[in-house]
Image (cartoon, rainbow, N blue to C red):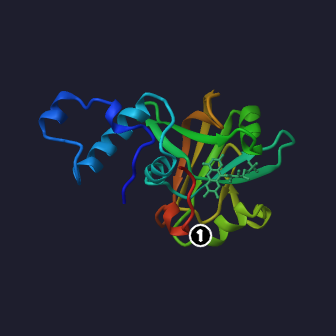
Amino acid sequence: MHTACAVPAAIIRPPVQIRQAGFFLTGVRRLRWNLISCGRHARSGEAVDKKAKKKILQMIPYGAYVVGTKTKQGTDHLMFGTWLMQTSFKPPLVAFALSEDSRTLANVRESKSFAVSFLADGMYGVAEGIVDGSFKNVKTERTPSGLPVVAGAAGWIDCRVLEISEKGDHRIALAEVVEVASGPGKLMPLDALKWHYGG
Ligand SMILES: Cc1cc2nc3c(=O)[nH]c(=O)nc-3n(C[C@H](O)[C@H](O)[C@H](O)COP(=O)(O)O)c2cc1C
């Protein structure tokens, strides 16, 4: 499908090597030019083509996770989430992007800790229950530090927050992994639920 940019291609000159490779603004080659233009344009920080942005960002693969925290009053809290990545081997660090208005972020700010359960293939009911807000019916266990994790998950990590980046509508909690467990089964990819979060 043609994913043209909002910027007229003619106002951006391609790099020399691309011009030498013969990318002229005719016929099928115009499509290649548009893709290149999108890249240059996006990097400049100006408006991007919304459809193309959504399409490409939704190609990032994610997993199905549950973030377990404690409220100020000490009760368990679970949130379905997917924006997790490892950011360091030594020390083992991860980043989780948490919605700025989520209760989970408020709990994380307060306690400086969270646990992430890796939902196993087939745990659709657990995922749906947590998204629907009925997480009190989800069977949980506890990490040694007392954070709630989903029973029967593929595994979990227990994290201590080092810093929170305050940029964007999700705040990135950068955290050290201090305890882990892995169970049977494999992480359920978000695709298995046919859900998207991104774009
Ligand atoms: C597929 C999917 C993925 C999600 N991923 C995240 C995520 O990575 N981070 C986040 O903060 N919220 C994510 N959410 C939204 C939260 O689950 C939702 O905002 C929740 O209501 C916040 O719960 P809380 O206020 O109880 O913490 C996702 C929702 C869905 C349906």
Q: Measuring 32% from the left and 35% from the top, which residue is drawn there?
A: 10
- Where residue 63 sits in the image (x, y, percent)? 51, 56
Q: Which residue is mark 1?
A: 123
Judge whether residue 52 can be spotted in this image: yes
Residue situated in front as seen by the camera: 86 or 180: 86
x 39%, y 52%: residue: 3
**Rendered residue at 65%/28% (across/down):** 166
Q: Quadrant of the N terminus?
A: bottom left
Asked whether, in this view, residue 158 is left or right of residue 45, the answer is right
Q: Position of residue 73 (x, y in %)?
A: 87, 42
- Describe residue 15's horizontal placement relative to residue 193 as left or right: left
**In the figure, 163 relative to 7: above or below?**
above
Of residues 23 and 151, which is closer to you in this image? Answer: 23
Residue displayed at 48% across by 67% down:
185
Q: Does 80 sit left or right of 95 as displayed?
A: right
At numbered mark 1, what does the secondary structure look like: helix, strand or loop? Answer: loop
- Relative to 154, does residue 101 appear above or below in the rendering? above
Where is residue 170, by image quadrant?
top right
**Residue 7: % across, % down:** 42, 37
Q: Residues within 10 Å of mark 1 (few under 14, many from 20)?
A: some
Amino acid bearing label 1: Met
Depth check, front residue: 93 or 188: 188
Q: Is residue 62 left or right of residue 136?
A: left
Q: Position of residue 136 (x, y in %)?
A: 79, 62
